[in-house]
Image (cartoon, helix red, strand yellow):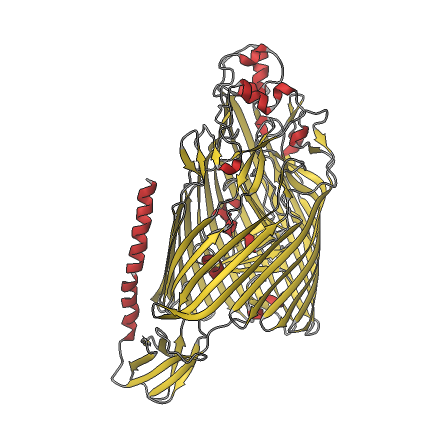
Amino acid sequence: MKKNKILQYAVLSLFLIVGTKAFQGYAQEQTTPIINASIEGQIIDADTKRPLDGVTVQLEGVTHSVRTDREGNFRFVTGQKLPVRVIITYLGYEKKTVVLSSPTSVVELKASVENLSEVIVTSRRRREQLQEIPIPVSLVRASTIEDAGAFNVGRIKELIPTVQLYASNARNTTLNIRGLGSTYGLTNDGIDPGVGFYLDGVYIAQPAATWLDFIDIEQIEVLRGPQGTLFGKNTTAGAFNITSRLPKFDPEANFEVSYGNYGYIQGKASFTGPIANNLAERVSFSGTQRAGTLFNVYTNRKINDINNLGFRGQLLYTPSEAVEIVLAADKTIQRPDGYGWGIAGVVQTQRADYRQFNAIISDLGYTVPYTSAFERKVDLDTQSKADNELGGASANVDIKIGNGTLTSTSAWRYWKWVPLNDRDYLGLPAFTISAGNSVHDQWSQEFRYSGTISEKVSGVVGLFGLWQDLKTDPVHTEEAGSALWRFAQNSNSDLWQTPGLFDNYGIRTVYGIKTTSLAAYTQIDWAITPQLHVLPGIRYNYDKKIANYNRTRYGGLETTDPELVKLKNGVYSDQAFDTDASAANWSGQLSLQYKLNTQFNAFATYSISYKPVGVNVGGLPTANGEVLLELARVKPEAVHHKELGVKTIPTRNAILNLTVYQTDIKDYQTLVQTPEPGVNRGYLANAEKVRVQGIEVDGNFRIADVLTINAAVAYTDGKYVKFENAPVPLEEVGGPEAFKDISGGELPGISKWAGSLGAELTHKGSLLGLPGSYLLGADVYYRSKFSSNPSPSKYLNIDGYALINARIGFKAANGLSIIVWSRNLADKDYYEQLLAAPGSYGQYAGVIGDPRTYGVTLRYNLK
């Protein structure tokens, strides 16, 4: 089946490339001459004086256009009298409008060299220069992503050292900025992320969205720090603002196909053009396949593969110059064979010797069939499955009113998740099934006005509503097998060995969460003087969650023997509760900005924000046989954030920025583990106070328009200021205390030091007679060691590592490109995450980073 799909992709890619002929024919239809009057000319490079082949020359105000030949010559016939105005466009060169006053002309085009200080972003809900805004923002262009062989958020995190992304599968995804945002470890659906994820203005609530293939995007802006006075959904840690390419009224098509090791194949295509005078469309497709990077010795097959299909369609309607309407719909389907993890290590707990992992598997006659997880082998007796489907539709309306724009964004999104996991990480029937099937629907509406209020005042004001419905589909299932008795055994009683006691014994859970989030927000930019700006912002939040939870036991030995029932209840028990939680709060920020001149921009920000109230829907721990219902609700986080920043432009071709910050959080929402198998996803709790502080430096430098250097380094210090009732780490399970004061301990997932350094060299030349530019680029990403457990453990730490990505290629001026790329060029073995197995028996698994991958990408941009 996989081979058939690969063949389909190959055929599709060939079809797309051949299809350009039809598109060219469509475009050439626009060149029909008006009457017989001839104008000729030549287009040359302004620096090298070489003729340029394939330049588009179009008469202004009409669709009549032609292209230059290999000698740079063009000729068209028109009924217009000289002089005439023509628009000249060419990939990699500045667009130029020229007045031709003679029948024969020579026009020089200059290669486009973007001034680094003129990069445009929409972080403040309007188009502005990156260096002008008082917010630390990291920008990643689509060209950077495409040339590097990256296609989702997980593959660009190496470019932005302040971003942390951890995922054992699409559901269990943590997207953090500066170490804050979401709980570290397995996901609990009852909590909101602290990092906003936006696609064309639409907030996407589920972290599984970070696994989406990028489909025809323009750029990604990563805003650091709270942004609740700018965005609809409260973002206490930052935001990902993703902008896709919009429909155009000029016909255009893009085709891309990539091949690489591990059977990697990816095809992409997009088409855009006019349907009517004021209606344009854009259709985009992406498909990705790759063989698995792990080998399951139990089933004798590879797992952890990639099998993605994505589609996005857009319509742009401009009924007048003041109104722009964009309708969009998308769907992504991911059907991988995965995900599984190998045993990374075994910890000696404080339980009795017979309750240690090695003693347990020895008694069961089992040996782990590999000595290191980096052998990329696993032994899983349950099929791995992670079916992930996301999609939705949106309508965005922009209306120019006065000196600003009124925007309405309406959207519906859905998510469907069908997993199957082996949670003991072994080829033993201990915890054999973990299947948290879920379905999620969300509806959102935002009204926002952004613009200039007076000569000195501008700003944004908005209303936002989000309604979510998440539920099991139809149930969540956790099931044990015949070997569980030995793992669960906590006494020398012979009753543990009762035949069939735990065979197919498990729990089925049905739960649902309905969420309402309402907000009003505004931020003003008041220019007291041209240099000094004051930016106050305020926000009102109302959040409510209604949850119901009901789980029941099934299977195992049918018995009324009270001793046997007690043993079964010690593993799984019935549990049910209904709860609701709501909170309303005011938050805001105050920023001061001082623009000494166009090269120096300093700012200071103080903000207060809140992360919404949460509810526990992953099972609750028990004490003396009683469910701790008081843990069903989780308090909202209160965030106090202080930040100082300086953005500088030392030269036209260089920028250098510095940010210093401190974030204090009261009632920090964290996910903690417990030895109880019935709480296998952990449960949510509040740490009294945490603090994250750090320094960030980033810059870009261009030398002689041929060498570009990008660098960023971040120092981040995150710790629990006060957490007196945290669960003990894995090595202390079974000791005299079930909880521990970890005040002063480090927060999980945060490296003290992280940085990236990239360079790209370009040189004009030709390949097979095609003029263009060669490129050679490399990026290095480094991060120091970090804790991989909510309660600091001396065993569950991940060593620091460095990754090297590289690329070499040629980009022809006619739109054809070929890029050879490699990721993790040095084939570094490293862990992305370490996960303790349910029940805390001592073993823990490792989520291993991708091995060295490499491939070639062919791309053709047709205009």
Q: Residue at x 43, y 62 (%)?
A: 809
Looking at the rendered structure, the number of numbered marks drawn on it comes to 0
At 35% from the left and 82% from the top, the residue drawn is 42
59 sits left or right of 683 in the view: left
Q: Where is residue 609 in the image (x, y as percent from the top left)?
A: 67, 51
Q: Position of residue 525 (x, y in %)?
A: 65, 66
- In this rendering, is residue 24 above or below 165? below
Image quadrant in which you'd find residue 719: top right
Dividing the picture into quadrants, the one containing residue 844 is top right
The quadrant where residue 521 appears = bottom right
Q: Position of residue 13 (x, y in %)?
A: 32, 54
Would residue 408 appear left or right of 281 to someone viewing this image? right
Q: Nearer the viewer, residue 54 or 502?
A: 54
Specify the quadrant that holds the N terminus: top left
Whether residue 641 is visible, yes or no, is no
Identify which residue, 440 or 593, lies in the foreground.
Answer: 593
- Look at the image and tell me in which quarter the C terminus lies: bottom left
- Seen in the picture, residue 206 relative to 126 is either above or below; the reply is above
Residue 281 lies left or right of residue 454; in this view the side is left
Report the residue at 51% width, 68% height from top: 400
Q: Which residue is drawn at 45% across and 29% down?
A: 382
- Kindly tell me whether residue 595 is visible in this rendering: yes
Q: What percent of the width, then of the height, locates residue 572?
A: 56, 23
Q: Nearer the viewer, residue 661 or 326?
A: 661
Q: In this view, does 419 lie above or below 759?
A: above
Of all residues, the one furthest to the left in this rendering is 36
Is residue 619 or residue 176 the one in the foreground?
Answer: 176
